């Protein structure tokens, strides 16, 4: 990577809400990134703890840190949109307020994105980084979508996200906004994060990118440590309700491909795998198979839940 390329401004975009215990480590990790042209943008979504005071204290000694404040709580979707609107960088990289970047994160992701842009003719590509998941003993390594270096694109990605059916080529993987990096123009083309989704707004964004023909690339390198921390918007029932709402939002697309009921079954698999009882999970797996047996088996019976459980458990799927 040339010195000229390294002068390209990148915005680290952090949505902060009641993160007094974790926001400092996130900002410190952003400060330690080995990219010379850096803006660290924090939008505080009307925190009621001491988060904002701490962020302002950190910004006082580092002019790369810029703080924007919401007077009322608008939610994660609206806050991510504000981050994109306020960002000054040519590239925008999201960082959650409890996660920790590896120093080489931006180099790894910019390199992957630029290779993908050179190899394809796609005007809009998003880059996701692989991550280490702290607090999760099973599958602590979260491999990013397209982390094998093969660009994924189009509605096959949207179907994979919504139904679990793998594309015919390439590798699916994690596509959460905590490792998302893209050009400003890509964010502008896809549009705002949906403010109605306090969870899954990043999944909705990825689906919309896919449906407009956009591309996805990932890094094999781990770019950050993701911490699993509790919050009111992470309970299983709320996440499930929003997963169903996401599928309803994209119902026309799913119905046009004959996969709407399969997408609902996928959401049920995810929920009952984590919230139980297990017989409900197995029943959801069976339902998915009955709805799309050909596609299910063409994918090697590898319809997976978001937590990584393989639906090859179908052979045990009796209530």
Image (tube, rainbow, N blue to C red):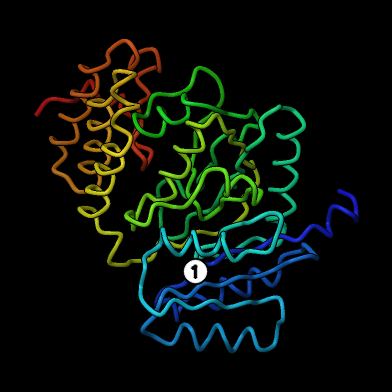
Pick out the residue farthest to the right. Answer: 3
At mark 1, the secondary structure is loop
Say left or right for 283 vs 127.
left
Which corner quadrant of the image does residue 8 belong to? bottom right
Which corner quadrant of the image does residue 94 belong to? bottom right
Q: Residue at point 63% right, 75% down?
A: 28
Q: Residue at point 33% right, 17% down?
A: 296
Place of residue 2 in the rendered image (x, y in percent of width and height, measured from the top left): 90, 50
Judge by depth and name the residue closer to the eye, 142 or 255.
255
Place of residue 196 in the rendered image (x, y in percent of width and height, measured from the top left): 32, 55
Place of residue 140 in the rendered image (x, y in percent of width and height, measured from the top left): 47, 50
Say left or right for 166 vs 238.
right
Q: Residue at point 62% right, 37% down?
A: 217
- When the figure is inspected, residue 290 is found, relative to residue 73, above or below; the finding is above
Say left or right for 121 vs 248.
right
Judge by depth and name the residue closer to the eye, 296 or 238.
238
Quadrant, the C terminus: top left
What residue is disc 1 on?
Answer: 97
Q: Residue at point 40% right, 80% down?
A: 71
**Residue density around tag 1, few if under 14, some if 14–19, many if 20 or more, within 10 Å:** many
Place of residue 283 in the rendered image (x, y in percent of width and height, measured from the top left): 15, 29
Say left or right for 46 vs 86.
left
Labels in figure, total: 1
Pick out the residue farthest to the top. Answer: 294
């Amino acid at each position: 990577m040339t010195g000229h390329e390294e002068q390209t401004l990148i915005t680290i975009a952090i949505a902060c809400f009641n993160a007094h215990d974790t926001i400092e480590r996130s900002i410190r990790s952003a400060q330690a990134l080995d990219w010379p042209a850096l803006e660290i943008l924090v939008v505080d979504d009307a925190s009621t703890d001491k988060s904002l005071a701490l962020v302002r204290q950190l910004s006082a000694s580092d002019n790369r840190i810029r703080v924007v404040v919401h007077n009322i709580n608008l939610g994660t979707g609206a806050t991510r949109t504000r981050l994109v609107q306020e960002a000054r960088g040519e590239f925008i990289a999201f960082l959650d307020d409890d996660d920790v970047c590896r120093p080489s994160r931006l180099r790894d992701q910019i390199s992957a994105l630029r290779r993908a842009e050179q190899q394809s003719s796609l005007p809009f590509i998003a880059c996701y980084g692989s991550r280490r998941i702290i607090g999760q003993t099973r599958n602590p390594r979260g491999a990013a979508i397209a982390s094998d270096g093969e660009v994924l694109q189009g509605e096959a990605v949207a179907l994979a996200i919504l139904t679990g059916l793998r594309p015919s080529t390439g590798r699916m993987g994690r596509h959460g906004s905590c490792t998302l990096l893209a050009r400003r123009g890509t964010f502008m083309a896809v549009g705002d994060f949906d403010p109605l989704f306090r969870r899954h707004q990043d999944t909705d964004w990825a689906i919309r990118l896919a449906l407009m023909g956009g591309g996805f690339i990932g890094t094999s390198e781990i770019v950050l440590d993701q911490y699993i921390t509790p919050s009111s918007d992470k309970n299983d029932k709320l996440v499930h309700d929003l997963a169903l709402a996401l599928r309803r939002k994209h119902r026309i697309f799913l119905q046009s491909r004959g996969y709407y009921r399969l997408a609902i079954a996928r959401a049920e698999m995810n929920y009952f795998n984590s919230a139980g009882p297990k017989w409900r999970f197995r029943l959801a797996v069976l339902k998915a198979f009955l709805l799309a047996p050909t596609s299910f088996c063409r994918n090697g019976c590898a319809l997976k839940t978001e937590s990584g459980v393989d639906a090859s458990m179908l052979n045990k799927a009796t209530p």
